[in-house]
C-alpha cells in the first residue's frame, strides 16, 4: 500500500529516513567547508607601516626572561 500525500498544496510528512539523510548531508557539507583553505581578505594597497626594529637573530635574553629562568629552577 502506498501512503496518501494528503490534500493538494500540503507538504508530505517527513520520515525519519529523510531527516537523517538531510542531517548526514549537512554534516558532510560542514566537514568539507572546514577543510577548505582560507584566504585572507583582500585589502586595498596602502603604504607599508614602519615595522618596529627587531635585532637580528630572534631570541633575546632580556631581564624578563632571566627572571623567569631564575624562578623556574627546580
Image: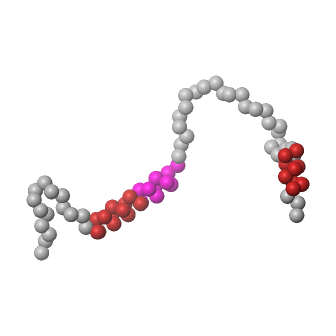
Q: In this view, does 1 lie above or below 14?
A: below
64 relative position to 25: left or right: right
63 relative position to 37: left or right: right
Q: Position of residue 19 (x, y in %)?
A: 31, 64
Looking at the rendered structure, the number of numbered marks drawn on it comes to 0
Q: Position of residue 5 (x, y in %)?
A: 13, 63
Secondary structure mostly seen in the magenta stretch: helix
Q: Which of 43 and 16 is in front in this view?
A: 16
Q: Nearer the viewer, residue 27 or 63?
A: 63
Rendering quarter of residue 44 = top right
33 relative position to 13: left or right: right
Image quadrant for the N terminus? Answer: bottom left
Q: Which of 11 and 30 is in front in this view?
A: 11
Magenta span includes 15:
no
Rendering quarter of residue 46 = top right
Q: Which of 60 and 7 is in front in this view?
A: 7
Q: Which colour scheme is used?
A: secondary structure
Image quadrant for the C terminus? Answer: bottom right
Q: Which portion, as a residue range, is magenta?
A: 28-37
Q: Is residue 62 above or below residue 24?
A: above
59 relative position to 41: left or right: right
Q: Where is residue 9 in the image (x, y as percent from the top left)?
A: 13, 54
Amino acid at each position: 500500500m502506498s501512503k496518501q500525500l494528503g490534500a493538494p498544496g500540503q507538504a508530505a510528512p517527513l520520515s525519519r529516513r529523510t531527516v537523517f539523510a538531510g542531517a548526514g548531508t549537512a554534516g558532510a557539507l560542514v566537514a568539507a567547508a572546514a577543510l577548505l583553505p582560507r584566504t585572507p581578505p583582500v585589502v586595498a594597497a596602502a603604504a607599508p607601516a614602519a615595522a618596529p626594529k627587531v635585532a637580528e637573530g630572534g631570541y633575546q635574553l632580556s631581564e624578563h626572561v632571566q627572571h623567569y629562568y631564575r624562578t623556574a629552577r627546580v
